[in-house]
Image (cartoon, rainbow, N blue to C red):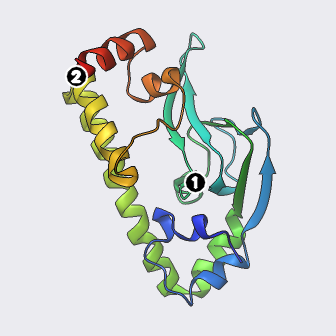
Amino acid sequence: MLPEKVTKCHLFAGLTETDLPLLSTVGRLRECRRGDLLFEQGEPAAGFYAVASGKVKIYKLSPEGKERILHVVLPGSTFADAAIFDDGCYPAFAEVLEKSTLVFFPKQDFLDLLHQHSQLAINIIGGLSRFLRQFVTQIEDLTFRDVPSRLARYLLDLGAEQRSEVILPFTKTQLASNLGTVSETLSRTFRKLSD
C-alpha cells in the first residue's frame, strides 16, 4: 500500500478508495539521500515521483550556471508527472534536499494502468488541472506582483495549512529563488512586513 501522504497528493485527489490499490501495483518506494540528483533537464522521462517524506527541489540552470528554483516539493505532492504525457523529457533538474522517501511511478506501467482503467485516468486529469491552476498563479505573481506581495501570498497559503504558526519548509535562499528574488531582498522584505 502507498504511504498516506502520497495518496493525499493533488494528482490523486480525485481518486476513489477502489482506485488507490491500483496505484500500489505500479508505485515503487525509494529511499533517497540529501544531494541525490533524480533527473536532469532534457533527460528522457522514465516516470514521475510522489514525496512521502522529505523535500525535493525542482530547478533550472541559466546559461551562466545560476540556479533558479521553480518549486520545492514537500510531502504529499508529485513532480515530473507532466513529463510522462508530453514530449517525454524532463523539463528541469530534480535534487533531493534532505533524506526523503519517494514513490516512483514508472512511465509505461503508469500509462498502461490508465489505459486499462479509464475512470482512474479521468480522476487524475482533475488533479492535474488543479495543479496547473497553481502554476498559473505563480506566473501571475512573478509577472504582476512585487516581492512583498509575493511573500505575503506565500505566507498566507502556507498559513492556511499550519494555522497558528508558520514554519518555512526550506532555507531563506531557496525561498528567495522560489519567489523570484535574492536573499538580501527577501530579508529586507521580512523586516518590512514585520515592522
Residue identifier under label 1 = 75
Q: Nearer the viewer, residue 1 or 111?
A: 1
Residue 152 lies, in percent from the top left, at 26, 33
Name above or below for residue 22 compared with residue 171: below
**Residue 104: % across, % down:** 71, 60
Callout 2: 10 Å neighbours few (<14), some, many (20+)? few
Residue lying at 31% horizontally and 53% vertically, measured from the top left? 133
User: Is the N terminus in the top left, top right, bottom left or bottom right quadrant?
Assistant: bottom right
Looking at the rendered structure, which numbered label has been put on residue 146? 2
Q: Nearer the viewer, residue 142 or 1?
A: 1
- Image location (x, y in percent) of residue 55: 62, 43
Secondary structure of residue under mark 2: loop
Q: Dot 1 lies on which element? A: loop
Q: Residue furthest front?
A: 164
- Please indicate whether residue 32 sits to the left or right of residue 58 in the image: right
Residue at horizontal 47 percent and vertical 86 percent from the top: 119
Quarter location, residue 5: bottom right
Disc 2 and disc 1: Cα gap in Å?
Answer: 28 Å
Based on the displayed image, in which of its 4 quarters is residue 92 positioned?
A: top right
Question: Is 80 placed above or below 141 here?
Answer: below
Q: Please state the horizontal and vertical placement of residue 18, each as a whole percent of the image.
A: 57, 90
